[in-house]
Image: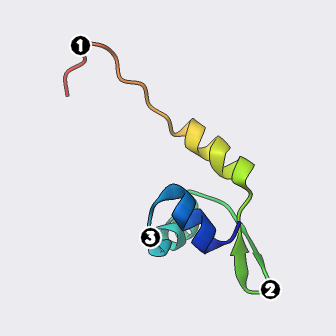
Amino acid sequence: MNIDELAEYLRIQRQTIYNWLNQGKISGIKVGGVWRFDRKDIDDWLRSRKRVSKVGEKA
């Protein structure tokens, strides 16, 4: 998927994706000047960032 499709998929702004790329938070490949992202890699990244709150846990 390209950056516009990824932004829509994650429901975030394109600039956030560019920031994450520069910070090394996500990975992609640039082909012909266009960023491309693998949906499986993005889904794996999302799962790795998943947090489970404990019942009765205080903030």
Residue at image position (73%, 48%) is: 40
Dot 1: element: loop
Looking at the rendered image, the disc whose residue lies closer to the viewer, 2 or 3, is 3
Q: Quadrant of residue 6?
A: bottom right
Cβ atoms under marks 2 and 3 closer than 8 Å: no
Residue 46: give x, y in percent of width and height.
57, 44
Q: Is residue 13 above or below residue 38?
A: below
Mark nearer the N terminus (2 vs 3)? 3
Residue at image position (58%, 37%) is: 48
- Within 10 Å of disc 2 (Cα), the crowding (few <14, some 14-19, many 20+) is few
Question: According to the image, label 1 marks what residue?
Answer: 56
Question: According to the image, label 2 marks what residue?
Answer: 32
Question: According to the image, label 3 marks what residue?
Answer: 13
Q: How many discs mark residues in the rendered view? A: 3
Cβ atoms under marks 2 and 1 closer than 8 Å: no
Question: How far is the residue under mark 3 from the one under mark 1?
Answer: 34 Å
Mark nearer the N terminus (3 vs 1)? 3
Residue at image position (58%, 61%) is: 24
Residue 34: give x, y in percent of width and height.
71, 81
Q: Which mark is residue 29?
A: none
